[in-house]
Structure formats: C-alpha cells, structure tokens
C-alpha cells in the first residue's frame, strides 16, 4: 500500500461522497481543504493529514488514519478517518427546524374551522410569534 493517495479518490473510498465525480467536483469548486490549502482533485494526502470538507451546508473535518484506494463498506470506512467535526456544526440546523415542521392538529370529526375560529387561531399565532 502506498503512503500517498489522491484526495478525491480517498473521499470517495471512505464514503464522504457518493461518487468520485462528486468528490472531484467538490475539490475543483474549492470545497475541500487539506490543512489550510484548497485541494485540487489530484492532490495527494497522507496519514495524519487534516481535511476540511464543505458539504450540504456543513463544514466537516476529518483526520486521515488509513489510506484506501477502493470503496469499502461503511463499517470499514469509519476506521479510516477520525471525525473532528464539532457537535455544534452537526446540529446547527436543529434549532431552526424545531417547532416549524409540525402541522396543526384538530380534533377528529370537528371539521374545518369556522370564520370566527380561524380569526382566533390567526390572532393566537400572531401573538405567539411576536412575543419571541
């Protein structure tokens, strides 16, 4: 096994990206850094290198523990890197979604709200969200 491997190939092999093409495109668009330097797809990495990957709005950080060239199953892939991503980064969207995805509930069989009930609901919502 060699002591260096292409960064796009490693990111694909450890399942950070679904395809090697996506890994290469991420490198080309400046979303992958090795240390503090923006990586090109052909840049080589070694054991102990720190990678920073911007993916789906998250800034992921990895430390390379093992170099593999072929894509492996998830249980084996996890052993090839150490995830250094802070917990705050992984949960940064959680607060934004809290209370926003749940729809309103109405008793079964109560039917649609009347015009008067609708106004009361709107007034309540307006009051609740202006208080925060």
Image (cartoon, rainbow, N blue to C red):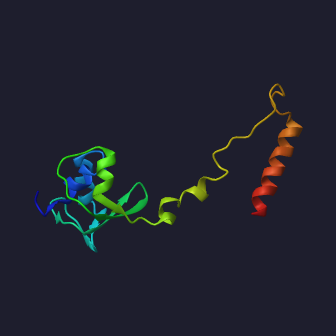
19 or 103: which is nearer to us? 19
| Outermost residue to the top | 109
The x and y percentages for residue 27 are 25, 59
| Residue ID at (81%, 56%) | 127
Q: Is residue 94 left or right of residue 23?
A: right
118 or 50: which is nearer to us? 50
Give the vertical position of 94 relative to 105 (above or below): below
Q: On the image, which quarter does residue 61 sit in?
A: bottom left
Q: Is residue 15 left or right of residue 127?
A: left
| Outermost residue to the right | 116
- Residue 58 appears in view: yes
Figure label count: 0
| Outermost residue to the left | 2
- Which quarter of the image is occupied by the N terminus? bottom left
The x and y percentages for residue 48 are 25, 69
- Residue 16 appears in view: no
Q: Is residue 32 left or right of residue 56?
A: left
| Residue ID at (83%, 50%) | 123
The x and y percentages for residue 120 are 86, 45
- Which quarter of the image is occupied by the C terminus? bottom right
Give the vertical position of 86 relative to 71 (above or below): below
């Amino acid at each position: 096994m060699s002591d260096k491997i292409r960064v796009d190939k490693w990111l694909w092999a450890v399942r950070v990206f679904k395809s090697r093409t996506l890994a290469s495109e991420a490198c080309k668009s400046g979303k992958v850094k090795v240390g503090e330097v923006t990586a090109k797809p052909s840049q080589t990495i070694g054991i102990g290198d720190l990678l920073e990957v911007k993916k789906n709005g998250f800034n992921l950080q990895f430390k390379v523990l093992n170099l593999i060239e072929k894509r492996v199953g998830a249980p084996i892939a996890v052993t090839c890197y150490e995830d250094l991503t802070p917990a705050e980064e992984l949960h940064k969207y959680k607060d934004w979604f809290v209370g926003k995805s749940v729809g309103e509930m109405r008793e079964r069989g109560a039917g649609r709200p009347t015009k008067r009930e609708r106004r009361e609901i709107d007034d309540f919502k307006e009051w609740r969200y202006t208080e925060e």
